[in-house]
Image (spheres, rainbow, N blue to C red):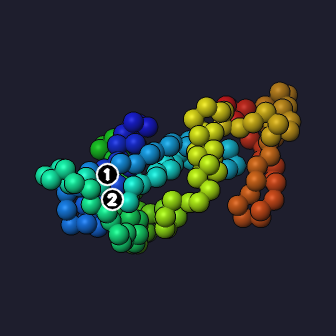
Amino acid sequence: LFNQYFQCGWECVQDVLNTATRKSLRCGCLMVLHVVGRKGDYKPHLHILLMDGGIDPKTGSWRSLGYFPYEILHKKWQYHLLKLMKSFFKTPEMLTLVDQLWKQYPKGFVGQILKGDVPKKMKKLTKYLSKYLFRPAIANRRIKKYDPAQGVVVYEYQSHRTKRAELETVDVLTFL
């Protein structure tokens, strides 16, 4: 499913680029998959670094985007992700869920978009993304307690909401 998730992200990027330029361009991008959220919960999501343009396959020349219509990205991502879900889970319940999600999110699914040029501190961005390629999802120092009798693990995470360190308690199987 993760392979299809990457493919879904790639198709979305190409669709957005072609819609934005009204041309058939092939772009380059870097995708990194994170499978856990800040709290350590299962929250698969893609980080995508997109080039500011693409190659026109007919002429072989580079075409810059110049303007990027960020607002279409949300609807395109919603379309491609729901299409993936329907193709992978072919059940009446999934069709019902997809219909509900279209109605519940009329502007599309939220994606965090950093607008503008490549960040000046590219090393920070590279370090942030690369740590997910070769490190475990949670550092040992964040594990505060393991209680085998109760079958729980307590660990620390940095909350987006409070901007402070908070503790999360989960059963062992959820933690693993």
Name the element at disc 2: strand
Which residue bears the numbered disc 2? Answer: 53
Q: Residue furthest top?
A: 148
- x and y, in percent, of residue 99 in the image: 34, 62
Which residue bears the numbered disc 1? Answer: 27
Query: From the image, which quarter does the N terminus lie in?
Result: top left
Of 23 and 38, nearer the camera is 23
Please say whether residue 151 is visible from this viewpoint: yes
- x and y, in percent, of residue 3 in the image: 39, 36
Up-down relation of residue 90 to residue 119 (above or below): above
Of 61 and 2, nearer the camera is 61
| Residue type marked 2 | Gly
Locate residue 85 relative to residue 19 in the image: left or right: right
| Residue type marked 1 | Cys
- x and y, in percent, of residue 81 in the image: 37, 52
Up-down relation of residue 9 to residue 114 (above or below): above
Mark linked to residue 96: none
Contact between marks 2 and 1 (CB within 8 A): the answer is yes
- x and y, in percent, of residue 44 in the image: 53, 45
Of 107 and 68, nearer the camera is 68
